Image (cartoon, rainbow, N blue to C red):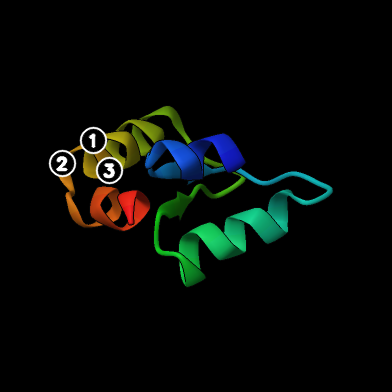
């Protein structure tokens, strides 16, 4: 997560265990630089999230702050 933040890149989170839930919470709600994927996600949903993130400029701007 540190490399992503330092690089100014938005993230798609798919938390499983350990500190991933905490990182996902901060990235998605506090810092607004990420989007969380549902654990039962299908391929088309991943594709749409990636496209949405690539088109959106707001998260990229927040990530680069």
At mark 3, the secondary structure is helix
Residue at the extreme bottom: 30
Circle 1 packing at 10 Å, graded few (<14), some (14-19), many (20+), is few
At mark 1, the secondary structure is helix
Q: Quadrant of residue 44?
A: top left
Q: Which sits in the foreground, 20 or 39?
A: 20
**Disc 3 target residue:** 53
Residue at the extreme right: 18
Q: Residue at x 36, y 51 (%)?
A: 63
Q: Cα distance, mark 1 to mark 3?
A: 5 Å
Residue 16's tag is none
Q: Is residue 39 above or below residue 24?
A: above
Please say whether residue 46 is visible from this viewpoint. Answer: yes
Residues at badges 3 and 2 in contact (C-beta under 8 Å)?
A: yes
Residue 51's tag is 1
Q: Which sits in the foreground, 57 or 2?
A: 2
Q: Is residue 25 left or right of residue 9?
A: right
Q: Which sits in the foreground, 15 or 59?
A: 59
Residue 47 lies, in percent from the top left, at 32, 31
Q: Quadrant of the C terminus?
A: bottom left
Q: Residue at x 60, y 42 (%)?
A: 2
Residue 43 lies, in percent from the top left, at 42, 28
Residue 55's tag is 2
Residues at badges 1 and 3 in contact (C-beta under 8 Å)?
A: yes
At mark 2, the secondary structure is helix
């Amino acid at each position: 997560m540190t490399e992503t933040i330092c690089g100014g890149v938005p993230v798609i989170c798919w938390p499983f265990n350990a500190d991933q839930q905490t990182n996902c919470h901060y990235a998605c709600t506090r810092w607004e630089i990420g989007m969380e994927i549902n654990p039962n996600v299908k391929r088309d949903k991943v594709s749409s999230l990636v496209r949405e993130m690539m088109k959106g400029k707001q998260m990229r701007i927040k990530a680069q702050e």
